[in-house]
Amino acid sequence: MAPVGGALWRQLCAHQVYGANTNVGKTVVSTVLCNGALRHPSGRKVGFLKPVSTGPLDEADYRHIERFAPGTLQKGLYQFDEPVSPHIAAQSKTIPKDDEILKGVHTTLAKWTDNGIKFALVETAGGVHSPGPNGNSQADLYRPLRLPVVLVGDSRLGGISSSISAFESLLIRGYDVHTVLLFEDDYYKNHEYLRTYFEKRGIPLLSLPQPPERPPVEDADALARDEEALAAYYEKVSKESDVQGLLDGLSTRNTQRIDRLSSMAERAHDLIWYPFTQHQGMTAKDISVIDSAYDDYFQTYKPESTQASSTDAGVLQPTFDGSASWWTQGLGHGNPELSLTAAYAAGRYGHVMFAGTVHEPALSLAESLIKTHENPRLGKVFYTDNGSTGMEVAVKMGLRASCARYGWDASEEQISILGLKGSYHGDTIGVMDCSEPSTYNKKVEWYRGRGYWFDFPQVKMSQGMWRVEVPEELKESLGPDLKFPTLDSVFNLEERVKSDAGKRYHSYIQSTIEELVTKEGKKFGALIMEPIILGAGGMLFADPLFQYTLTQVTRSNPHLFSANAPSPSTTSWSGLPVIFDEVFTGLYRLGRRTAASFLGLHPDITVNAKLLTGGLLPLCTTMASNEIFNAFSSPEKSDALLHGHSYTAHAIGCTVAEKSLQTMADMEQTGQWSTYQTDWSSASSASTNPGSAIWSTWSHGLVRDLSFADSVEGLFAIGSVLSITLRDQTGQGGYTSTAAKGLQQQLAVTGRPYNVHSRVLGNVIYLMASVTSKPESLREIEGLLREALL
Amino acid sequence: MAPVGGALWRQLCAHQVYGANTNVGKTVVSTVLCNGALRHPSGRKVGFLKPVSTGPLDEADYRHIERFAPGTLQKGLYQFDEPVSPHIAAQSKTIPKDDEILKGVHTTLAKWTDNGIKFALVETAGGVHSPGPNGNSQADLYRPLRLPVVLVGDSRLGGISSSISAFESLLIRGYDVHTVLLFEDDYYKNHEYLRTYFEKRGIPLLSLPQPPERPPVEDADALARDEEALAAYYEKVSKESDVQGLLDGLSTRNTQRIDRLSSMAERAHDLIWYPFTQHQGMTAKDISVIDSAYDDYFQTYKPESTQASSTDAGVLQPTFDGSASWWTQGLGHGNPELSLTAAYAAGRYGHVMFAGTVHEPALSLAESLIKTHENPRLGKVFYTDNGSTGMEVAVKMGLRASCARYGWDASEEQISILGLKGSYHGDTIGVMDCSEPSTYNKKVEWYRGRGYWFDFPQVKMSQGMWRVEVPEELKESLGPDLKFPTLDSVFNLEERVKSDAGKRYHSYIQSTIEELVTKEGKKFGALIMEPIILGAGGMLFADPLFQYTLTQVTRSNPHLFSANAPSPSTTSWSGLPVIFDEVFTGLYRLGRRTAASFLGLHPDITVNAKLLTGGLLPLCTTMASNEIFNAFSSPEKSDALLHGHSYTAHAIGCTVAEKSLQTMADMEQTGQWSTYQTDWSSASSASTNPGSAIWSTWSHGLVRDLSFADSVEGLFAIGSVLSITLRDQTGQGGYTSTAAKGLQQQLAVTGRPYNVHSRVLGNVIYLMASVTSKPESLREIEGLLREALL
């Protein structure tokens, strides 16, 4: 089922009514509001929607509104008989899925908008966290719609507390509370306290006189008296309370919200200097305005031209976050568990400085990461804020270790790094220097590439076969292109290392290094690689055999780098410190905890970021071996690794990261990805068991089918990454190519129930999922790709 | 009053009882727990503390516990007569301050510990957010103690929601909920739902049978029957419910928490690679273990040797966060408004990628910052994650603008920056290159200082006078040291620029640049300064006249830098782009929105971080003029500023920053710092009005008095910064000096009611407050300084 759009219409002022508790008077408040809206001078049409109702009490609610706000259009979607929580009531009936309920609400409101209804309320049952039919909290269930909230406070003893807690639970989920209503109680005076509380937060509070008490239902006379009393009550409220003022306020906020959305692109275009963006020729129209995000979808403000094109039109459109927000997303946008985790850490610590101190989140995360990596070399964890700074630290570590061991004075001579062409390690100048001159860096005034970068064979599927493509210039040294029946067989390094290609790789790498050091006099201080996928350089899938062999040659031939190198067996690192930049590829991005595990290698230094916090906020770790750590040990303070950002190991980041790691590990252990794994293992050789095969959230069938498409040069999927290299008609390729723009635009077309945000790297378009993405959802996206490419 | 310690004892298992709502049975649950603890095989002594009680109902609670858990030591601290919320009851009586209530609870529990009580409950009134006597939420009021929580859930209809919301409100404030208890209700079955909910979160839930209903109070017979029924109830519970198991669990968690705290230093020492730390010689004892933090205080785990030294001993000690956690803190640790703000942003967006998109927090913050800076030059906002990366961006911007204007090819020749000696702009290699060779950078293998750095006169108070001290080598050029009666007069630039010193500064700077460019052939691409205070370089207070003159000379003599420079009047920036690094000094750190305002200058590029988020998490902005932005405009994508971290403009950071800015601006507007301002303006000339005088949170009297101390070479205070330069007996000074270590250790001594964490920079020790620090609190710290230095 297509994702639901955020519920926002220009012509309709719709709110969700949440109660601070059960029996706080939601129906009375709704009646007051509907009644008020009906009496509005503009003669508004009014709708009241109760998506899920339980028991005769709710029927009474309907009658109540019918009687006291006559003219209100009422609708229910699902009805259960017992007057208990829907999750219990639902046990006796077929339960509607959450998606269906959401769809039902959205469709109803859209239809009402078309029918000229101007004011609508969507009423919930019980309190904010009362369970919906599927047992999850209503506040979570309805979150994708993110309707603005009318909160009915609790005027009883204890009601201050329950009203504020309910409000906080809504905030944690990214709801906007537009107003609070509650009854006046002259003894407890909750309304006075709460008025001050909410007005301080910019939320108007309207207090209403207490409604007459309900008589026992049995007595007809009493019921009649009750009817009269209620009628008088509503009459009094409509005269004496400023309901019209409140309704006008709600309307104004609805309009302001949309006006603001509609102006944001212009204002951003005027004020924001965008990352990685050439602003020349960019117009405000090129900027997507994002109202909120949930799960894998943004809620994007629709261009005005497409807003009114269908009956379920509204101003918001769900947009699949196909770049996983620059490769960061793991556990879904607006994940309430992560929000709460972040809030807990903020509440317990705020930020606590991290030189000479330790706090639980930083220590726990360090311990978990060490466990996660299963790399016996790693003994120390260093924190920074993002991949770029974490790689700066890694480079500082690697260079110091090799300079110390080999006795080089780096202030006198240039120490370089060894890497692969197309690498990318971040945007700060030090790590820019770790990549060969390219579009990304060559115009940066202080860029000075300091290294040697090997070109290498790449893996992709084309014409239904997995291929290892050797660059033309290297065919003489490395041999011809290779074909493999399955992706698993590409990774069968034990066999491949013994093959002809394996031997050629080895001798080519060894002789190249020899020449660089001996003939050109180069000194190398570290080997740096992004294992398996070189991300920003263009989603290059490196032949694992090449990365494996490069590491092995480096480690087993330390004399290549310095005549006085100790023998490999006496030290933990040998030749060069091996740095793996797993900022992008690590922590389940490729379906496994580490990308190193695909190569069966243990780096001496490894860097994690992006998915580390499940996609919530910046944090980075650089882990290193004790031997590398010891290279900084000295009686001199100035020999220490003098690096450390103010927010190093900030508690929120560490706590959220620990939670994310735990969640992903649980998903792995409980087989949450078995649908994906089965899909890929069935395409693999019969001998592979589902747990061990390489797998992707993108279906193997899609990859195979697209590999035959005319416009596709090659593609691959691994973990949550799908990367498609398109044929570039201009023959340019690379980052400046525009070949993939067309497909990107096709996926981004608005007006359909949803669209896809994607990023391109030259002639490469990629899509990325979360570890929590649902197969049905991804198969729909695949449908769009098939439509566009086949 | 001294801050209260976190409430944690090894011998005492103490919990705070919070209710999901009023009337959920807190007293019954407390009675069950006290009763159970009394019956424990080890024969425990038990205490029950109700800090604030209201009305006869509470008296009944006492009698209830006395009757059904006889032997429990009971205590109340404050008693109000009416059975309403304490904030209303308190209106009729003298209200105890929150600090007193906290102190009372802590003292009582400490005394009980000494008296051998093993199990204690501290009961709250009403729900978690029910107001305390001073009208703030109990969850906030008791937060500094951070007692682990026994949450009494709500078994009634709606109780699922209120229990979960109450739990969330506690989490947001950093509480640990150790167990949940509630009554069984076979119809609503809240206990079943909540058991699953809480056990998923590692929190055991014990459900108890429903207690007998309370009879009306008037009837003596009924009361007697009630007594019997209750006695039978408690007997039944103690036999049939696993209260002992629960109590053992609570004990175990208490012990585990302390054991963990006690092991953390060792584990961290083993695993953590600390920032800016020489690990050689460092032992686990040098690591402070921080359990949590609130307001200006950490709760630090006491070294075991000092744990039992006084009656209010416990294992936690409040420690004043005297480095403002590396200069980041503004609004206090554990600030619930910031936690909630962070959670809202996480709930609404998670992280949303920021190339080609815009969301409300990023746009709002950009707009607010432009407004805050009141600098007509600034037109664009670029986001990064921390000061270092933001400065990398600033340097890239500045260099590009000047290379474009002057037609330099930076890949062919070295473009340098102009700055001050002792500058520090971050730890990434690019910005390290913006500082002269020093302890911080010279051993970094890839460091290559690229610039010229002026030495400059410094401001400090000594012997009761404000002095501008000119470095010996510059006296010939700049003239002798100067004396000023007030700090304001040092900043009277209008007058000073016309003085002899002003003229000397001008000609010295102009001739130096001339020589560098003409004779040495240097090319400069940007002028970079930390305005007023050079932080990491040693808290150097630069003579504002020097920084002002350097900027003016640069701007009014563009021909100094390139023969083909346009005339100053035709461009927005002239000579060199002027970059102000306000990462440390900006946003109220020095008492004003910008440090630039002290100089009356408008930089072309300005960088903010640290206080930007009020001290919660990393975020940085680099703002620039439109003309500098336009230097990157071209039809070529590769000419763009190709910089951008994955979490660029993350929603949590932007939302929290916007909230922090707003809060600080409100404090400024409502005169929250008037006590400080009055103190300083009264020490200033009579003509200065309190609003305009330079001021500090540290008292002028302290600065004056310490300036006469033998061991003090000089000192200054401005905004929330106090910096004391100690006489270095070894004559070494600088970052490697150890002169300030002694004072630092004196302040850090444990065993007193609280101690002070501080950082030193060589022979400089500094203390830093938040913008929310209370005068009384800072004056106490000042007392410690006086004690140590006078």
Image (cartoon, coloured by chain):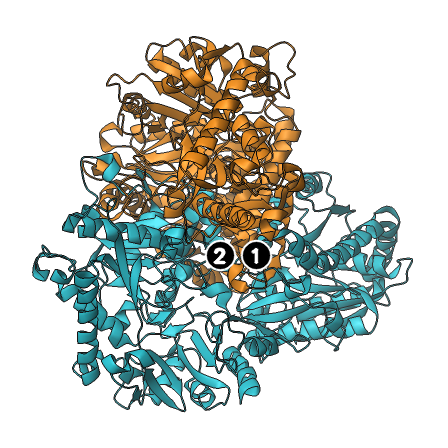
Chain colours: A cyan, B orange
* Numbered tag placed on residue A274 in the rendering: 1
Left or right of A298: which side holds A303?
A: right
Using the image, determine if residue A728 lies above or below residue A515.
below
- At 55% from the left and 37% from the top, the residue drawn is B559
The spot of residue A192 in percent (x, y) is: 71, 39
| Disc 2: CA contacts within 10 A as few (<14), some (14-19) or many (>=20) | many
| Residue A672 position by quadrant | bottom left
Q: B169 and A227: which one is in front?
A: B169
* Numbered tag placed on residue B43 in the rendering: none
* Amino acid type, label 1: Tyr
The spot of residue A787 in percent (x, y) is: 57, 87
Q: Is residue B236 visible?
A: no
Location of the C terminus of chain B (image quadrant): top left
Q: Is residue A665 visible?
A: yes
Q: A527 and B38: which one is in front?
A: A527
Q: Which residue is mark 2?
A: B644
Left or right of A453: which side holds B230?
A: right
* Circle 2/circle 1 CB separation < 8 Å: yes
* Amino acid type, label 2: Gly
